[in-house]
Amino acid sequence: MAIERTLSILKPDCTARNLTGEVNAMIEGAGLRIIAQKRLRLSQDMAEAFYGVHRDRGFFGDLVKFMTSGPVVVQALEGDNAIARYREVMGATNPYNAAPNTIRRRFASNIEANSVHGSDSAENAAIEINFFFREDEITG
Ligand code: CMP
């Protein structure tokens, strides 16, 4: 298996309920290493740029509003097959469809306040990690 990196965001519904530690324990328990991490409040410009691919979707305005409503924790994760592995640990985008013992099944409220984001491809992982971290902020 290939060692990969992926970008994770613990969303405002997660930080608001003090769940950073519990989610990080699930990430580390799944064999993924948190090789960079910071807590910040996304500006409107940052949220619109990060989710630019969804600009034409009906939920875009609400998504940007939600993602700027409180602090987030952004992380670079590393491990075997990290992109697919983290998507398994997160569970389906809609928590009602998420498998038991996934982050979203345990903690998410709905499809918008779904607790975490993870990159969906190697190409996007590189772009998304680069969006939040300089290379010298990542210690693998
Ligand atoms: P995320 O993995 O961060 O990528 C885009 C986000 O848009 C997604 O998780 C959801 O939180 C959010 N979203 C809100 N409504 C929808 C929807 N109808 N379909 C897909 N994503 C949605």
Image (tube, grey):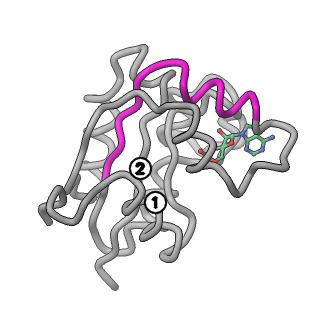
Q: Earlier in the sequence, mark 1 or mark 2?
A: 2
The numbered mark at residue 119 is none
Ligand 1 shown in quarter = top right
- Mark 2 packing: few (<14 Cα in 10 Å), some, or many (20+)? many
Q: Horizontal placement of 2 versus 120: left or right?
A: left
Q: Residue at x 70, y 57 (%)?
A: 53
Q: Secondary structure at mark 2?
A: strand
Q: In 3D space, how far apart are the residues under numbered discs 1 and 2 (Cα atoms)?
A: 9 Å
- Mark 1 packing: few (<14 Cα in 10 Å), some, or many (20+)? some
Q: Which residues are magenta?
A: 61-75
x and y, in percent, of residue 35 in the image: 19, 56
Q: Secondary structure at mark 1?
A: helix
x and y, in percent, of residue 39 in the image: 30, 32
The numbered mark at residue 8 is 2
Q: Residue at x 39, y 22 (%)?
A: 15
Viewer-nearest residue: 53 or 45: 45
x and y, in percent, of residue 71 in the image: 40, 24
Q: Residue at x 36, y 43 (%)?
A: 74
Q: Residue at x 39, y 74 (%)?
A: 81
Q: Does 114 sit above or below residue 5?
A: above
Q: Nearer the viewer, mark 1 or mark 2?
A: 1
x and y, in percent, of residue 96 in the image: 71, 34
| Residue with the mark numbered 1 | 128
Residue type marked 1: Glu
Q: Does 68 sit above or below residue 124?
A: above
Q: Horizontal placement of 53 versus 59: left or right?
A: left
Q: Horizontal placement of 134 versus 10: left or right?
A: left
Name the quadrant of the N terminus: bottom left
Q: Is mark 2 within 8 Å of ligand 1?
A: no
Does the magenta-highlighted stretch encompass residue 37?
no
Viewer-nearest residue: 81 or 48: 48
Residue type marked 2: Ser
